[in-house]
């Protein structure tokens, strides 16, 4: 295989150019870096680069694996590998593993260290140069200062355009960001849902100085249910209350009312029992023959409640085990949002159906995230707006 391969001195210049201002990522990087340094020493060239080891990172971010060899780790995580033990096959498997590790690094230690190295060289000091390097993609972006610290986190369906807005806006906050920005990194998610969840989680975790440190809940109102004295399930919109379990949540009262009006029409519910038509007699829809009469007990509670429960089941994932499948970063890849017993567990990416039908593998590729009220609101709101999403349900 190596008979016709070039000698090291013939490719040494190209290696120097390729790795200039770069961090070398390798599985057991100590070995690969030592080989490179040895060969360059023979040529009398002082080769020095920063390295990242995916073995060490995997032990920290994906603990509990039986083995951390590339082949066994790829198999246990469902990472597809072709041409095993060949340069290209191993390199592509390492890239996929490294992407997974970057997703799992919620503290952003890897990226912060990288920016710190670059910032010392004063690269990307010009805001126009920063914008020039950014892509038109969906994801989460991180604005860093010269020390590598994250000063602002945001989400966008077009990162390049969004950063341009930050760097040209004349608001007080934007001017402060412009003053301190030294670099922008980003994570391509492909999925708007994944971007929304990561943005919410990482603002809370990293507390950037130009995001509100104690961010208010992104929803203000919620839909609740109760059974009245006649046995009918009533729906009511109220201000969100953390002590109660909502059916779904909303960013404002108007969007909640709009949702209820649509639900009344879709499930043929009573305007009176959904709080949309306060009256002591029949609701308006009954008068025009569009309500079956639950408001005046003309329809039995059993018959009416069946449709209300259908609405609740459609808009709530309480006690359900499911994976929400959405678009991702590449054509052959999909994102997965895992929910177990109604609790949001985290997000991940997969290339093969095997990775999401095997629960153990699925749990390994998922980046654990907090099941807070903001995350639940983001998921429920996204499901309401994107009705064609693929959802896989599985048993307990």
Image (tube, rainbow, N blue to C red):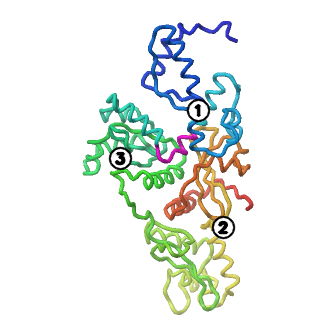
**106 within the magenta span:** yes
Identify the residue position indicated by label 2 in the image.
Answer: 319
Q: Nearer the viewer, residue 73 or 365?
A: 73
User: Is residue 97 found left or right of 121 in the rendered image?
Assistant: right
Q: CA distance from mark 3 to mark 2?
A: 38 Å
- Tell me how far mark 1 sits from mark 3, CA to CA: 28 Å
Nearer the N terminus, badge 1 or badge 2?
Answer: 1
x, y (%) of residue 236? Answer: 52, 79
> Which quadrant of the figure contains the N terminus?
top right
Identify which residue, 270 or 392, lies in the foreground: 392
Task: Kindly identify which residue carries mark 3.
Answer: 151
Identify the element where label 2 is drawn. Answer: loop
Residue at 25%, 47% in the rendered image: 170
- Residue 394 pos. (x, y %): 73, 58
Q: State whether residue 30 is above or below residue 56.
A: above
Q: Earlier in the sequence, mark 1 or mark 3?
A: 1
Q: Which residues are magenta?
A: 99-108
Q: Which residue is mark 1?
A: 95
* Residue occupying the point 45% across, 20% down: 48
**Quadrant hosting residue 145:** top left
Q: Earlier in the sequence, mark 3 or mark 2?
A: 3
6 versus 138 height, above or below: above
The structure residue drawn at horizontal position 53% and vertical position 14%, both measured from the top left corner, is: 38
Q: Residue at x 60, y 78 (%)?
A: 269
**Of 44 and 138, the residue lying toward us:** 44
**Where 75 sits versus 299, above or below?**
above
The local crowd at label 2, few if under 14, some if 14 to 19, many if 20 or more residues have their Cα within 10 Å, is: few
For marks 1 and 2, give the CA distance. 36 Å
């Amino acid at each position: 295989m190596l008979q016709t391969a070039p000698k090291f001195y013939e490719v040494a210049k190209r290696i120097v150019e390729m790795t200039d201002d770069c961090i070398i990522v390798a599985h057991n990087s100590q070995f690969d870096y030592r080989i490179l340094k040895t060969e360059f020493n023979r040529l009398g060239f002082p080769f020095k680069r920063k390295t990242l080891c995916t073995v060490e990172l995997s032990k920290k971010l994906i603990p509990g694996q039986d083995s951390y060899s590339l082949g066994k780790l790829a198999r246990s995580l469902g990472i597809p590998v072709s041409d095993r033990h060949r340069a290209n096959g191993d390199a592509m498997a390492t890239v996929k593993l490294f992407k997974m590790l970057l997703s799992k690094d919620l503290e952003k230690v890897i990226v912060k260290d990288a920016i710190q190295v670059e910032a010392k060289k004063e690269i990307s000091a010009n805001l126009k140069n920063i914008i020039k390097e950014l892509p038109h993609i969906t994801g989460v972006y991180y604005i860093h200062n010269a020390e590598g610290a994250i000063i602002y986190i945001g989400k966008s369906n077009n990162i390049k355009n969004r950063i341009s807005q930050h760097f040209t806006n004349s608001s007080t906050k934007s001017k402060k960001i412009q003053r301190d920005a030294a670099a922008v990194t980003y994570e391509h998610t492909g999925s708007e849902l994944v971007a929304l969840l990561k943005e919410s989680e990482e603002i809370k975790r990293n507390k950037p100085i130009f995001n509100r440190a104690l961010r208010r809940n992104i929803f203000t109102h919620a839909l609740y249910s109760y059974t009245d004295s006649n046995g009918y399930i009533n729906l009511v919109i109220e201000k969100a209350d953390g002590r109660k379990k909502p059916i779904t949540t909303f960013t404002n009262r108007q969007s909640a009312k709009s949702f209820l009006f649509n639900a009344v029409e879709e499930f043929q519910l009573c305007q009176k029992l959904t709080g949309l038509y306060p009256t002591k007699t029949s609701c308006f829809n009954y008068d025009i023959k569009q309500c079956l009469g639950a408001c005046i007990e003309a329809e039995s509670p059993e018959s009416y409640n069946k449709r209300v429960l259908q609405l609740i089941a459609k808009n709530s994932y309480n006690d359900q085990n499911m994976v929400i499948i959405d678009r991702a970063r590449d054509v052959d890849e999909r994102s997965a949002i895992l929910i177990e017993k109604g609790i949001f567990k985290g997000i991940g990416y997969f290339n093969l159906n095997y990775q999401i039908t095997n629960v153990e593998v699925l749990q390994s590729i998922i980046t654990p995230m907090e099941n807070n009220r903001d995350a639940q609101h983001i998921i429920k709101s996204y499901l309401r707006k994107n009705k064609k999403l693929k959802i896989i349900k599985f048993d307990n």
